[in-house]
Amino acid sequence: MQIMVCYNGSEASQETLDVAMKYAKAFSARVHVVTSLAQKIETDLSDLSQREKAQQRLLEVKERLGSAGLDCVVALVTDDLTDGENLLHYADEHGVDALAVGVSRVSKVGKLLFGSTAQHVILAARCPVISVKPKARGG
């Protein structure tokens, strides 16, 4: 079995990774941890810095999963597609059996301006999707 985690380093994706690790142990699954950075026509230094940070986060995740005894593949996908499309393309290309994605509440205006990667993944995936909501803080 292969489980893919849509990972961007956020709190939601950290918790998604924790859930995916439990599933991977239960099903002896390989874990694909994938970050998407949509490619822009104009590249500046901040884009390169963002790519380096994403690669570093993925290396840290690979080390963490490896030390937990899990078979892990990490990938940074950069393409001219949206993040959601990049993630689903990777899943299809690698025969992923289940996706895990973090979800958080976004306003209607936020969805209109920025879209929702999680929503796209959940609605368009060809395989089952595990959606993980971050735990409430405080109270």
Image (cartoon, grey):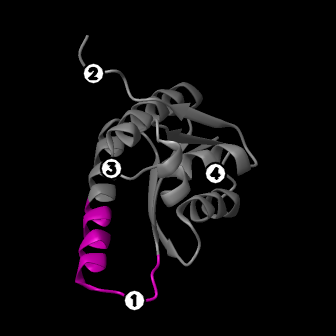
Local packing at callout 2 (Cα closer than 10 Å; few below 14, some 14-19, many 20+) is: few
Q: Position of residue 35 (x, y in %)?
A: 44, 59
Nearer the observer, disc 3 or disc 4? 4
In the image, residue 51 lies in the stretch drawn in magenta: yes
Does the residue at mark 3 contact the one at mark 4 (Cβ under 8 Å)? Answer: no
Under mark 2, the amino acid is Arg
Q: Which residue is mark 2?
A: 137
Any mark on residue 42, and which? 1
Amino acid type, callout 3:
Gly
User: Can residue 125 be seen here?
Assistant: no
Q: Quadrant of residue 98?
A: top right
Whole-percent x, y for residue 88 in the image: 64, 58
CA distance for labels 4 and 2: 26 Å
| Stretch in magenta | 39-56
Looking at the rendered image, the disc whose residue lies closer to the viewer, 2 or 3, is: 2
Query: How far apart are labels 2 and 3 at the CA level?
Result: 18 Å
Furthest-bottom residue in view? 42
Q: Which residue is mark 3?
A: 9
